[in-house]
Amino acid sequence: MSMTDIIICLIVAALMAMAVFHIVRVKRSAKACGDRCAGCSMSGSCHAVKMQKELKRMEKMKKAGTK
């Protein structure tokens, strides 16, 4: 085995290790937190857009109900 073959094998192994690490990290961060979002590591970003839309909808309903 030449030095070039060894270097190529090391590069391929490093790329595969990085891919596996990335997949594991994404899977861990994407786990559903259920109804316990306060303790979730993704609580700040996981449901942020959904919660903002829900709050706006509730404010509109509240304003419509008071008039």
Image: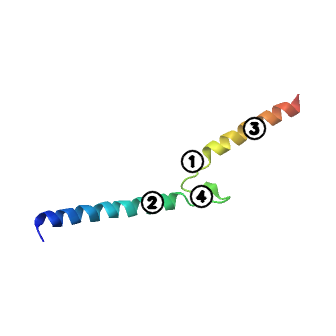
Q: Secondary structure at mark 4?
A: helix
Q: Are marks 4 and 1 in contact (CB under 8 Å)?
A: no
Q: Quadrant of residue 15?
A: bottom left
Label number found at residue 57: 3
x and y percentages locating residue 3 in the rendered image: 11, 65
Give the CA distance from mark 4 to mark 3: 25 Å
Q: Which residue is mark 1?
A: 44
Residue visible at 88% across and 28% down in the picture: 67
On screen, residue 54 versus residue 21, left or right, reads right
Label 3 crowding class (10 Å Cα cut-off): few <14, some 14-19, many 20+?
Answer: few
4 or 3: mark nearer the eye: 3
Q: Amino acid at mark 4?
A: Gly
Residue underneath mark 2 = 25
C-alpha separation, residue under disc 2 versus residue under disc 1:
17 Å
Whole-number angstrom distance, CA of label 2 to CA of label 3: 34 Å
Looking at the image, residue 2 lies above or below residue 56: below
Q: Mark 4 or mark 3: name the one nearer the start of the chain.
A: 4
**Dot 2 amino acid type:** Arg
**Secondary structure state at the residue bearing disc 2:** helix
Give me the C-alpha separation between circle 4 and circle 2: 18 Å
| Lower position in the chain sequence, tag 2 or tag 1 | 2
Q: Which residue is mark 4?
A: 39
Q: What's the CA distance linking mark 4 and mark 1?
A: 10 Å
> Which mark lies nearer to you, 2 or 1?
2
